[in-house]
Every structure is written in structure tokens, then in C-alpha cells.
Amino acid sequence: MLRMLCWRLLALSSLTLGLIGMLLPGLPTVPFVLLSAFAAGKGWPRFENWLLAHPKFGPPVQQWRQHGAVARRAKWLASLMMVFSLCLLWYSNLMLWLQLLVSTTLFLVLMWLWRRPER
């Protein structure tokens, strides 16, 4: 029972973060929706079915599950958000090693993202 409750909390909190990400730059939407669908599949099949049938959230989840695919529009939006985040990062007063670490991580994520198949 506790395990199912934890999966449900993760599904709801991930979807909430995804919804917030639709409004805030720098916070991704699709990865949180994917995490929400994964968690719902572990402990809340009804919520998972709702996500899969949703006109906005369903197609990216289904494309990811079937082919590991990410739509080109999502790739471009993610890339632009990462560049925007990097500009803010390098404008900040953070330590150089932290700026380099985050920049390297974002670069590796971009490389991985653009290697994913599209629709």
C-alpha cells in the first residue's frame, strides 16, 4: 500500500512540475510527463491510461515508449531553453568549476537529445 502511494505521489508531482514547466522557461515539460507516466504505470493504471489518452500529453509518451522518439519541435524548445539557462548561468556569480560542470552536463544532454529518433 505504501509503495503504491509513493508511485502515485511521484506521478502527481511529476505531472504538476510538467504543467509548471509549460509556463516557466528552464523547467522542462516532457521529461516530467514521461516520469509521471512511468510512475503511474507502476502504481496507478487508471491515471496512466488517462495520460496516454490525453491529446496533449499522450502522443509524446507513446512515441517515447514505442520508439524512444522525441519530436523535433521538442528538441528545438529544449535546446533553446538550455541555451537561455546557460546564458543566465554564465552571467551569474557562481564558481567557475560549477559553471563548467553544468555547461558540460547540458552539452551532453543536448548531444543525447539530438541523437534520439524523431516521429
Image (spheres, rainbow, N blue to C red):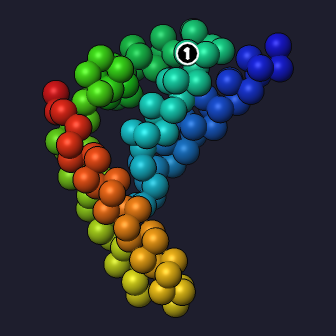
- Whether 99 is drawn above or below 8: the answer is below
Callout 1 secondary element = helix
Residue 21 position within the rendered picture, expressed as x and y whole percent measured from the top left = 46, 50
**Residue 39 position by quadrant:** top right
Lateral position of residue 33 relative to residue 65, left or right: right
- Can residue 49 be seen by looking at this rendering? yes
Lateral position of residue 92 relative to residue 119, left or right: right
Lateral position of residue 58 relative to residue 77, left or right: right
Lateral position of residue 68 relative to residue 97, left or right: left
- Whether 93 is drawn above or below 88: the answer is below
Question: How many numbered badges does the structure rendering display?
Answer: 1
- Whether 74 is drawn above or below 65: the answer is below
Residue 72 position within the rendered picture, expressed as x and y whole percent measured from the top left = 17, 42
Residue at 68% over, 24% down: 7
- Can residue 55 be seen by looking at this rendering? no
Image quadrant for the C terminus?
Answer: top left
User: Furthest residue to the bottom?
Assistant: 93
Classify 10 Å Cα crowding around label 1: few (below 14), some (14-19), many (20 and above): some
**Residue 26 position by quadrant:** bottom left
Image quadrant for the N terminus?
Answer: top right
Residue at 17% over, 33% down: 118
The residue identified by callout 1 is: 41
Residue 9 position within the rendered picture, expressed as x and y whole percent measured from the top left = 70, 30
Residue at 46% over, 33% down: 33
Amino acid under disc 1: Gly
| Closer-to-camera residue (76/53) | 76
| Closer-to-camera residue (79/100) | 100
Residue at 65% over, 32% down: 10
Residue 117 position within the rendered picture, expressed as x and y whole percent measured from the top left = 18, 33
